[in-house]
Amino acid sequence: MKKHSPVSRSGRFKGGPDADVAQFTESISFDWRLWRHDLAGSLAHAAMLRKIGVLSRSEAAAIERGLHAIAREIQQGKFRWKPELEDVHMNLEAELTRRVPAGAKLHTGRSRNDQVALDLRLWLREEILLLLGEIADLQRALVSLGEANATVVIPGYTHLQRAQPVYLAHHLLAYAEMLERDNERLWDGWSRVNVCPLGSGALAGSTLKLDRGFVAKQLGFTDLDGKPRLTQNSMDAVSDRDFAVEFCAAATLLAVHLSRLAEDLILWASAEFHFIRIADAYTTGSSLMPQKKNPDVAELIRGKAGRVLGNLVGLLTLLKGLPMTYNRDLQEDKEQLFDTADTVRASTRLMAAMLRHTKVNQTACRAAASDPALLATDLADYLVRKGMPFRQAHHAVGSVVALAEKLGLPLNRLTLAQLRSVNPFFGRDALVVFDLKRAMARRNLPGAPGTKEVVRQLAAWRKKLSR
Ligand code: ARG
């Protein structure tokens, strides 16, 4: 059986682990993507070691050159990752040391435990910003679709039953609101990612005079005043993955919002609703039924929310029984974290692109919104304006609905005499209630789907998102 001899086993161990063990324990196959962050951390650490005199000027310069050369090779796809070196940290350090003897000093006062915590934080800090960009773009796509169909009214639903009319834009802006809360949650979490753990060592810091503040500043772990933000407990710092859990939780809620939007689009694209047409590029055909056009992108966005939720539960489960401090279990955090980040970013991006390639079928929307039953509540409000207590008005309109059903007539086709036969409060102006345009103009409470209010909301979103 092939034997390996990774760096971490030198000295204490005779020979390397069994090949099967090496394969079981390696993380390079997925943590290689942290290479830029690992190199950035090493550059900052080396600069600090130079500052405190552990490295000579020429040693620091050689290490810097060596790290930059490795970065170039990775970028060009020329770097050979060695699984027997276990992870990204040891691959980079071993290669550096092979080229630059002073590389052997780089790990002074550092452990892979604080190193991996650092790399993850550096990586996630970037990842969150990229995701925030995609979220803003999706909000823009929602606003654009609303603006392009600003006069379109559809039924709003509760229990998936027609309830009251709303502007399509109002429905779309509901998702802009959800996404805004996702944005706030991710930002809030970002501030807890942005804390530097380096200098925590394996678990107990170092006896050397490391300058933690210097490293933190080099890597941008600073507050608004430019002061370094440092983890305050070395044991917590090497085993804390709260920042990853928070991200996965915020990302899961985002994925759930995307999933709900996907579900709406899937319903709207069905022949039963027919409110929208998703461009061919975002749908697929059936291998059997020639007429089919399936909203697969939306369905996959809905489906992927499941695995994002699974990652969150997996991560929490991973953490719940861990004794202090670092345990190798923590290596299992990465695939779940990476998968969540990749999945929500792609889902958000594709949702925005799909919306930009979606046309609203205004005729079908108009037909659905013209259902006079949607204005039954407006008729009750009419009676309230005439002085009737709402409970009675609700009952009276209920009787009107029953009468219309019995006569097989739409609500707005009843005569004044028929309305009065139910209740004498109904006057000549009662049927005006069914004028949809007027009905929409009346709904102008803040946050309501009224004509003026929705225009105001669209403009406010447009302004907010142009920043
Ligand atoms: N590959 C490890 C991880 O991802 C890096 C830290 C390893 N530390 C250790 N003491 N074995 O968690």
Image (cartoon, rainbow, N blue to C red):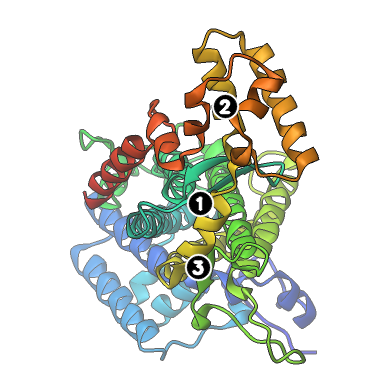
Give the answer, above or below, for where 178 lies relative to 290: above
Q: Are marks 1 and 3 in contact (CB under 8 Å)?
A: no
Q: Residues within 10 Å of mark 2 (few under 14, many from 20)?
A: many
Residue at 72% over, 19% down:
395
Give the answer, above or below, for where 408 lies relative to 140: above
Q: Position of residue 428 (x, y in %)?
A: 50, 24
What secondary structure is found at the residue carrying circle 1? helix
Give the CA distance from mark 1 to mark 3: 25 Å
Q: Nearer the viewer, mark 3 or mark 2?
A: 2
In the image, taking residue 372 as reference, residue 103 lies left or right, namely left
- Counting the numbered discs, the total is 3
Residue 288 lies in what quarter of the image? Answer: bottom right
Amino acid type indicated by mark 2: Leu
**What numbered label is drawn on residue 117?**
1
Find disc 2 in the rendering and name its residue: 379
Find disc 3 in the rendering and name its residue: 346
